[in-house]
Image (cartoon, coloured by chain):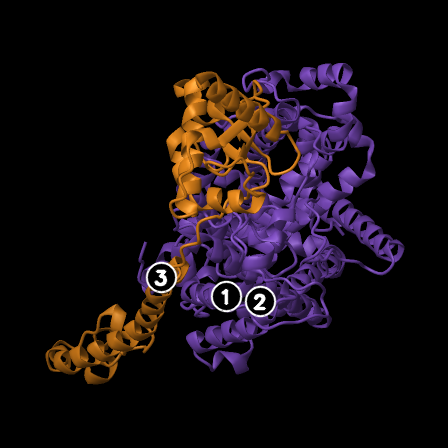
Chain colours: A orange, B purple
């Protein structure tokens, strides 16, 4: 009995190994770039990491198919290289039927972030050949930020222009009021300062020639 | 700095020079100090051309060796003509129309030509300032918008147009200009651009509304701040990785280029346009001087500062070039490395950046069939540092595409972006001050116009130029811009200045001119100046003029490069006509 089970298992395993052929059928190629992503903190690739991959993919299949009991043994890798890249196929639990490429692709797309996270990698460093990552939707704010800065600068410039245009008018008004107040005190001394009268040619009686006539 | 008007005439009064008192009474506004005049000239002359044209010429004509024709032309042509324009302005105390009419009533048209050329210039020059504002405002984001491509509607990757070009080119041609495929196709006005243009004219009005009183204060800032930014960029630039490649490229002189007549012609035209001769701005600025202002020293100082700034700016530009070229080269090597790793499934650390080339050879010999599959890609993506450095760019392409590409790769790019575009704005605004003054001053000398208030007249000029300038913010606007940039001022200026120097040397007469200068400065100009005015400069200008005519005739129908949405090429250069 035990031998029969063992024989069946080894047969199924060899069949599964036969199922995974690079570039043919429902196989996908996956590529890890651990050293590029993590540099000094890179972990070495070994059988444990491979197990993690198979577990993660089994999770992705379960998640997509809503509970079909995929297990680690349903993910079959082959042709592992030093690059850390390999091919894999997925088979249905209990039967040995291959899962078609489309289903596998959608399952991976759905759980891409979780698979990336398990390996501390990103869409760029954990590549599935032929499956393109869905990029995050661009964040568009209500008011584009440049409009805000523009508004501030435009406002400041407008205030400046208005100030420059209005200031001399205001000054002239103030001056007129001041002149109305000062006229009384100024008339007694009869002297006008240069600022007020430089252009008017004020006749300064101190230096007049009237003496000639009054000496009679 | 705020001297009341009455004190100014007293300061200028010198015993024995009773003429001064009479002069000041014509009510013409004055600069508060000679320093303001010098800074105004520096602000006007040092403009965008120093940043984006001179480095290109340097690169085109053999790096450091180009300085020789450049400096020789400065002595033969730049200095004497600059001096002459300042002398005319200071002596006649009128704008360009009035000044030339005083020399001879038949020469009034010369001044009018200057005014018309200045109008053309004002129309399109402020559009560059609008672009600088656009980029400046867009720098206040966490990710610079020209650093990454926008994502397409399927969210599978970047937009196709952006993928074929680079993100910086896409941002300039699609998002900033929204450019159409040809000059005939016209869409609407780009609202963002139009807003920035309004802002540019509003600021110009703010600076000139009070005439030289306001302009004089503003130039303290617009003339000096760009140097601060250039200095900061110099330090940042030379400490960037790979900058040394660009600097080496610039400073290794290729003396063979000196035999090329094009180098000398380009040096002559560069000096000529860089100093802003012929627009009437220098005459206008000088007309607000005191009668005995020592413009001889000032002319020498401003010309030297202008040339010095060009050289300074090209050091910065070449450091940036070197950084960008090295970055592109290393990215190219990295792409090659990945391609090899992925095709041959080698371990990640098998090939390092330095060993890419030798591995390419090795793999080619050991696995020829497999290599043949990617042979095309390898040939296409061949990495060459010299080729990267050789891509000489000038004009708006340099300022808005190459520089912004370098900036996005620097650490803390927002800060560098803001600094850089603010500097471009100051350079552009400083030149605009001179351009608008060149229009307003001669027109205000006419009795009809002087009845209108200063502010109203300046406002009308600004609004007029703004409305016409909106044409450059349409989707085909950049093509019109290129037409104006290449043809509006170049040819006419040569003609204007040629007539100017002939008029002064032969119609007015060198002897009378000498006496006027002696009257203003106290001594006659020495033989160098006289020979330049009478002989060398006119001959040089005639030579340039003939060269330009031959060029136009030989060039046939002028062509322009258009941005075709479907077949965007990655090496887009503004054509050098």
Q: Nearer the viewer, residue B319 or B58?
A: B319
Q: Position of residue B164 (x, y in %)?
A: 65, 48
- Are the two marked residues, 1 and 2, in contact with CB atoms closer than 8 angstroms? yes
Viewer-nearest of discs 1 and 3: 3
Q: Quadrant of residue B265?
A: top right
Q: Chain of mark 1?
A: B
The N terminus of chain B, quarter of image: bottom left
Q: Nearer the viewer, residue B374 or B64?
A: B374
Q: Quadrant of residue A175?
A: bottom left
Q: Position of residue A3 (x, y in %)?
A: 48, 16
Write down the residue under mark 1.
Answer: B197
Q: Quadrant of residue B523?
A: top right
Q: Secondary structure at mark 3?
A: helix
Extreme-front residue of the structure: A1
| Apparent side of residue B56 relative to residue A204 in the rendered image (left or right) | right
**Above or below B442: residue A58:** above
Distance from label 1 to label 2 (Cα)?
8 Å
Q: Nearer the viewer, residue A171 or B65?
A: B65
Crowding at label 2, few (<14), some or many (≥20) Cα neighbours within 10 Å? many
Distance from label 1 to label 3 (Cα)?
16 Å
Write down the residue under mark 3.
Answer: A148
**Above or below B124: residue A69:** above
Crowding at label 3, few (<14), some or many (≥20) Cα neighbours within 10 Å? few
Q: Earlier in the sequence, mark 1 or mark 2?
A: 1
| Apparent side of residue B55 relative to residue A112 in the rendered image (left or right) | right
Write down the residue under mark 2.
Answer: B473
Q: Secondary structure at mark 2?
A: helix
Q: Secondary structure at mark 1?
A: helix
Task: Decide if residue B411 is in sight here.
Answer: no
Q: Chain of mark 3?
A: A
Q: Position of residue A80 (x, y in %)?
A: 56, 21
């Amino acid at each position: 009995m035990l031998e029969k089970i063992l024989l069946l298992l080894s047969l199924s395993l060899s069949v599964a190994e036969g199922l995974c052929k690079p570039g043919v059928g429902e196989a996908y190629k996956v590529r890890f770039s651990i050293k590029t992503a993590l540099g000094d903190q890179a972990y070495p690739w070994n059988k444990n990491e491979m197990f993690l991959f198979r577990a993660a993919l089994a999770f992705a299949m379960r998640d997509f198919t809503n509970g079909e009991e995929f297990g680690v043994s349903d993910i079959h890798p082959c042709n592992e290289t030093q690059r850390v890249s390999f091919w894999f196929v997925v088979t249905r639990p209990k039967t040995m039927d291959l899962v078609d490429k489309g289903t596998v692709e959608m399952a991976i797309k759905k759980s891409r972030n979780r698979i990336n996270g398990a390996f501390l990698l990103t869409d760029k460093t954990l590549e599935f050949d032929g499956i393109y990552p869905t990029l995050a939707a661009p964040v568009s704010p209500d008011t584009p930020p440049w409009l805000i800065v523009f508004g501030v600068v435009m406002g400041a410039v407008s205030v400046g222009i208005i100030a420059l245009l209005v200031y001399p008018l205001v000054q002239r008004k103030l001056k007129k009021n001041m002149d109305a107040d000062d006229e009384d005190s100024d008339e007694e001394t009869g002297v006008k300062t240069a600022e007020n009268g430089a252009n008017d040619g004020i006749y300064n009686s101190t230096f007049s020639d009237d003496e000639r006539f009054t000496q009679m | 700095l705020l001297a009341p008007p009455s004190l100014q005439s007293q300061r200028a009064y010198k015993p024995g020079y009773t003429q001064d008192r009479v002069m000041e009474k014509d009510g013409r506004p004055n600069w508060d100090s000679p320093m303001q005049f010098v800074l105004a000239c520096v602000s006007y002359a040092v403009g965008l051309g120093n940043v984006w044209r001179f480095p290109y010429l340097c690169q085109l004509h053999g790096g450091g060796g180009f300085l020789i024709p450049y400096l020789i032309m400065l002595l033969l042509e730049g200095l004497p003509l600059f001096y002459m324009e300042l002398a005319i302005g200071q002596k006649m105390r009128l704008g360009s129309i009035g000044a030339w009419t005083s020399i001879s009533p038949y020469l009034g048209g010369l001044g009018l030509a200057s005014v018309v050329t200045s109008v053309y210039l004002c129309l399109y020059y402020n559009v560059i300032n609008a672009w600088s504002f656009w980029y400046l405002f867009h720098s206040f984001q966490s990710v610079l918008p020209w650093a990454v491509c926008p994502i397409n509607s399927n969210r599978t990757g970047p937009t196709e147009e952006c993928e074929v070009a680079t993100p910086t080119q896409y941002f300039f041609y699609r998002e900033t200009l929204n450019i159409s495929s040809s000059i005939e196709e016209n869409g609407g006005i780009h609202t963002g651009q139009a807003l920035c243009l309004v802002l540019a004219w509003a600021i110009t009005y703010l600076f000139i509304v009070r005439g030289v009183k306001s302009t004089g204060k503003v130039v303290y800032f617009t003339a000096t701040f760009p140097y601060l930014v250039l200095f900061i960029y110099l330090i940042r630039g030379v400490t960037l990785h790979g900058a040394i490649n660009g600097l080496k490229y610039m400073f290794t002189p290729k003396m063979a280029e000196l035999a090329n007549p094009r180098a000398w012609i380009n040096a002559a035209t560069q000096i000529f346009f860089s100093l802003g001769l012929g627009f009437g701005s220098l005459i206008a600025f000088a007309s607000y001087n005191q009668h005995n202002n020592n413009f001889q020293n000032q002319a020498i100082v401003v010309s030297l500062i202008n040339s010095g700034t060009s050289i300074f700016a090209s050091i910065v530009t070449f450091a940036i070039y070197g950084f960008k070229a090295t970055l592109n080269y290393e990215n190219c090597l990295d792409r090659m490395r990945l391609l090899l790793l992925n095709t041959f499934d080698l371990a990640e650390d098998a090939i390092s950046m330095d060993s890419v080339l030798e591995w390419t050879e090795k793999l080619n010999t050991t696995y020829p069939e497999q290599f043949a599959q990617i042979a095309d890609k390898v040939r296409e993506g061949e990495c060459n540092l010299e080729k990267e450095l050789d891509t000489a760019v000038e004009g708006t392409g340099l300022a808005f595409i190459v520089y912004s590409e370098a900036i996005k790769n620097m650490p803390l790019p927002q800060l560098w972006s803001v600094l850089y575009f603010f500097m471009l704005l100051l350079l552009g605004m400083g030149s605009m001050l001179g351009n608008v003054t060149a229009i307003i001053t001669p027109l205000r000398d006419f009795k009809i116009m002087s009845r209108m208030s200063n502010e109203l007249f300046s406002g009308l000029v600004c609004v007029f130029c703004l409305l016409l300038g909106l044409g450059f913010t349409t989707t085909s606007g950049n093509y019109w811009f290129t037409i104006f940039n290449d043809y509006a001022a170049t040819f006419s200026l040569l003609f204007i200045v040629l007539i100017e120097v002939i008029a002064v040397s032969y119609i007015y007469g060198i002897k009378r001119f000498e006496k006027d200068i002696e009257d203003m400065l106290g001594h006659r100009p020495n033989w160098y100046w006289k020979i330049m005015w009478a002989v060398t400069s006119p001959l040089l200008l005639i030579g340039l003029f003939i060269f330009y005519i031959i060029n136009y005739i030989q060039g046939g129908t002028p062509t322009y490069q258009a941005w075709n949405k479907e077949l965007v090429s990655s090496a887009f250069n503004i054509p050098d006509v």
